[in-house]
Amino acid sequence: MLQYILRRLLQAIPMLVGISFAAFVLMRLAPGGPMAIYAQNPSMSEADMRRIEHILGLDQPIHIQYLKWAAGMATGRGRIGPELAVQPGRALAFADDPGWPEVPRLLGDPAVDTDPPDWLLDGMVSVLTRWAQHWGQRPSVVVPMPSRSRPRLVHGIAERLATVGRLPLVDALATNGPAPSHALAPSRRAGLVETSLRLVPGTQLDGPVLLVDDTLRTGWTVTVAGALLRAAGAPVVLPLVVHRRP
């Protein structure tokens, strides 16, 4: 019986490889391909595009690209490499943090957009002050995440942090279309996040970025936003959120 099961498993391996390779090729043949997220920035030169292709390994032979893609699928890692990754971020509150019971109420569903209250602004400034002791490089700009559900809240927090830190506030990111539904499968939602975020035309960065958002769950939105900002020239992206959800 064991030999039969092993034989069937071995017979299934070529079929699984063939199906996964076909899926990989179809994704590469999609309009724009993996570089579509970066090509949306008209300020990017041909040299910038080639540099990012090299970072992502898209200039390698197709079979090497496939093996790396398959390894990423097996380990749960995305295709955004460490060269475009964000730094470990900070959050004011985690899950049902008893120290900040107001946070889940403020950021609960359905979303209500409002100006950030003083207690929230003071808390975010306090987190930023403690975090600053561990920075290798101080941020040179503050970038708010282009929130669909709470734009006033997120922009208000970013504006206060920029004022306290005497930093310019740069609206470097924008969104396309509606927000991906949380009911979608994780892989499908991740793909839509990639195509729904873009750099504002003309964005050029030459220093570390403090990226501000209200909530973080899977971290993929921040990851994609960080990759865009890194591709625009930011050497470091430091994410700061109000609520880290489980």
Image: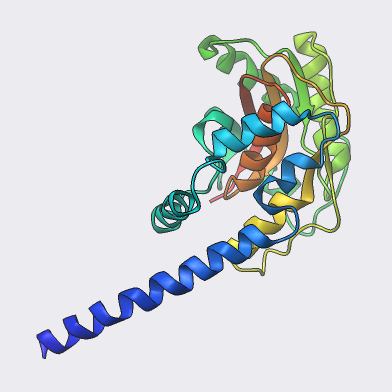
What residue do we see at 64% from left, 10% from top? Answer: 138
Nearer to the camera, 30 or 171: 30
Q: In this rendering, does residue 115 appear at all? A: yes
Q: How many marks?
A: 0
Up/down of 138 relative to 94, above or below:
above
Q: Is 197 situated left or right of 218 in this image?
A: right
Residue 171, horizontal then vertical, whole percent: 86, 29
Up/down of 40 relative to 170, above or below:
below
Q: Which quadrant of the view contains residue 214? A: top right
Nearer to the camera, 190 or 39: 39
Q: Which quadrant of the view contains residue 126? A: top right
Residue 183, horizontal then vertical, whole percent: 67, 69
Up/down of 103 relative to 28, above or below:
above
What residue do we see at 84% from left, 32% from top? Answer: 155
Image quarter where the N terminus lies is bottom left
Q: Is 156 situated left or right of 16 in this image?
A: right
Nearer to the camera, 20 or 210: 20
Looking at the image, what colour scheme do you see?
Answer: rainbow
Q: In this rendering, does residue 99 appear at all? A: no
Residue 176, horizontal then vertical, whole percent: 85, 51
Q: Is 189 situated left or right of 40 in this image?
A: left
Residue 50, horizontal then vertical, whole percent: 66, 33
What residue do we see at 70% from left, 21% from top? Answer: 233
Nearer to the camera, 227 or 87: 227
